[in-house]
Structures are given as structure tokens and as C-alpha cells.
Image (spheres, rainbow, N blue to C red):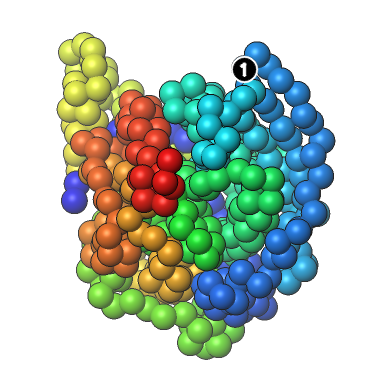
Amino acid sequence: MTFSKLDRFYRGILLSRYFIKGWGTPENLKRLLLFRKVLSNRSDCFKLVGEHYPIEITKDEYEGDIHILEGHFYSPFNFYLPTLLPKESKEAHFQMILPKKWKDDGFKPVCIHMAGTGDHYFWRRRHLIAKPLLREAGIGSIILENPFYGFRKPVYQMRSVLNNVSDIFVMGGCLILEALVLFHWCTKHGFGPLGVSGLSMGGHMASLAATNWPFPLVLVPCLSWSTASGVFTEGVMSRAINWDMLEFQYKENEAFRTELYKMVQIRESDAFQAGKEFVKNFPESMLHLKEHGPGLDTKKEISVSKSALFPINQKLTKFLKMNTEPVSDLTNFSLLLEKVFHPKYIDRSSISSNKQETINFMRGIMDECTHLKNFSVPVDTSLIISVCARDDGYVPRDGVTDLSEIWPGADVRFIDAGHVSAFVLHQKEFRQAIIEAFERYRSKYMLH
């Protein structure tokens, strides 16, 4: 599998960094790991949310032929791990985009759309997915706000930057339970068939949410795969993580190396080759981070100029001064990036072998909480259409369990693109997959 040069470049020019405060407390991680065992069992998880869970509708209006609802509800996650969710994230907010009048009262399809990384509020999914789906196929949408995003973003958080590794697991746990609330509410109000979809991180969150609904459900995860572990240890996102801080905390606190390490399952078949590849390329992943130690002052970091914080900008500028050829399209741009990312333009330095244990722990804890092998199989895998980018630099697939092995019968498709270019250029393919999956449901389960 080759990584898109555009993915690598795009990640390189962004200021966002992840897990700037570290792992989170060992106590919180332990509670999340134990709760994962409940969330991953459909019969147990389904009991956590009642079918009449209260939702308050705060907006009900029409814009032309579109019916818009907005509402909120108390996240069920608070009842089980109440201290892990920031106060701003405790209320779940959503927006529904529906037709003014359904064409068929017996067929009212509604799809929940999970947010990808950096997708705050409702506007992006409303304009790129929800309104086109309604116009093209009469499919209604629910746009659910992520914890830590938009209305639910903590006051102390900068942009989309999650402070702790544990926050990504809190986010996933919230969305699994909140999806159940919305599925119940839709069923009670006569909507259906139901589905869930998302792009990138949203695609994986959609996959997790779909595992716990005990009825046939449309599932269309886009630009995601079977686990999130490779995203943070191999893909271009790995360069946005302060590995020095994670290593420091891992070494300083014995609880990580003893009790927590025993609670995670290192999937050797998935992790071994990928881990070797990461270590081989680790200096490149650490390009932007090697000068910052565990005591990183995040406020000071933001004041640093982009060129100082991201040496790749200087390398690109230097290269462009040496090369005056026009860059007229994505193909030429990709060729330019290949030259920019040639080893002679990248400073490579040795890394400590101690980092390998930190990387292994990250892979282990990510697999434990996000690997789809650890969750129930959706009721009807023939209603799953997964759309992946063949050269995805954000979501590596090499050495990772194939989706079709975990979910036999699922339709796994590939677009000839990287992660970023697929998002920009292939929105229609994502919508078409959703439309097709709902048609499969209709032909299989509905007589008219």
C-alpha cells in the first residue's frame, strides 16, 4: 500500500496536534477499558439505553421543501462514566434534515452522519451530504455533533485538538450510546429504514455505532478501516502526536507498564509488521516534534510561526525556488510532492529504542478500544458498503485485518485516490453508496 503524497503534505501544513496532555490518567483509562467490554457486546450495550429515552426538540421549521428539526438530549455516557466527560459535552446536539412530504409513507429512510476529524457544528455535513441525499434520493439525515466538537467543545480545548488519548475513547463511547438514543427515537416516530455513515474518523465511529443495534441497519463507513491503531502509529497523523511526552509519561508511571498493559491485547498479526514499518520511518514522523520535550507549553507553541514549527514549509519554499515548472493539476502537484519528500529534503535522525514499547502500548490500547474484531458483527452485513481510498495516507491497511474478514458479506470498495483527494473529489461516490445501501434494504425487507 502506498501513501498519498498529498495526504502527507496536507497533514504537514496543519497546526493541529493531538494528545497534547498525554495519555490521560491510568484510572480513567482502566475504567474505559472495562466499559469497552460492555459496549462491545450487543445484548449488554443495548440494555444501557431505554427505548423511550427523552429527547427535547428545540427547533421545528421549514425552509422551502426541507423540514429542519434540531434537538438535544443528555448523553447516556454520563450515567456510566460521569466524570470522564467535560461539562460542555454532556448534552448531545443534533440536526435533522427531512423532506417536507415523504413520497412513500412506508419508506422514510433516515441516516445518521458521524463527524470526521475537525467537523464542527452541522453546516459541513448538511451541505455536503444531507441536502444532496435528500435532493437525489429522498433520504433524511441526522447530523450528530461529536463530543469535544462544536457546541460540545470544552472551553479549555484548542480547535479539534483532543488533550488526551483517553478522550478519543470517551468520544467513541458517547457516540455508540447516543446513536442508540436516536435509533430508538426514529423508530418510535415512524422513521425507517435507518442507517449510519461517516467519513474518516466519522466512518469508524459509524461502524462502532452500528454494531449494537439488534436490527438490520444500513452502514456506509467511508475512508476508514477495521481499527484506528494504524491511524495514530503509522499514518501521516502519527507526526501530529507528541511521542516524547507519551513516552515520558509511560516510563514515569508504572501503572501504564503493569496493570494497563495487561488489559490490552496486542494483535501480533496486525501489529508486528506495521510496528516495524513505523519504527523504520519514525524519524520522518517525528520531523515536526523532535525539538519539543515532555514539558511542552501549548500556549507558547501556538505563537510560534508556521515556518519555525513546520520545517517542511521551508523545504517546500526551497524546492520551489529551485524548480520553476508550473503546477497545473493534481497529477503535477503529486509529482512535485514526491520530489519535496525525497529523503534529501528530510532530516532523518536516530530514535531511542525505548519508544517501541510506547508505540506498542498505543497500538494495543487503540486496538482494544477500536478494533472491530472486538465488537459484535452487525445483524445484516449485506447492508454494509465500505468506501476506501486506495492510497490512504491517514488510514493504513497493510498488516491490518481486512474488513471483509471481520464482516463476511460486506461490500468493500476502493477509490483510486488518497484520503484528502477522496474527500474533496469523491463526495458523490460516498452519497451513491448510501443510496445503494438503502435500496438494498428496501428490496430485501420491504414488500412494496
- The residue wearing badge 1 is 65
Q: Is residue 3 left or right of residue 289?
A: left
- Give the residue drawn at x 62%, y 58%: 180
Q: Is residue 280 visible?
A: no
Q: Amino acid at mark 1?
A: Asp
Quadrant housing the C terminus: top left
Q: Secondary structure at mark 1?
A: loop
89 above or below 128?
A: below
Q: Is residue 68 left or right of residue 128?
A: right
Q: Is residue 30 visible?
A: yes
Q: Nearer the viewer, residue 289 or 109?
A: 109
Label 1: few (<14), some or many (≥20) within 10 Å?
few
- Give the residue drawn at x 53%, y 72%: 42
- Give the residue drawn at x 46%, y 80%: 264
152 above or below 331?
A: below
Q: Is residue 290 left or right of residue 209?
A: left
Where does residue 37 sit, x and y in percent of width and height?
Answer: 55, 78
Count of picture labels: 1
126 above or below 55?
A: above
Furthest residue toward front: 448
Where does residue 261 sit, x and y in percent of width and height?
Answer: 48, 83
- State which quadrant residue 143 falls in: top right
221 above or below 4?
A: below
Where does residue 381 sit, x and y in percent of width and height?
Answer: 35, 59
Where does residue 408 sit, x and y in percent of width and height?
Answer: 28, 64
- Give the residue drawn at x 32%, y 67%: 406
Q: Is residue 88 left or right of residue 97?
A: right
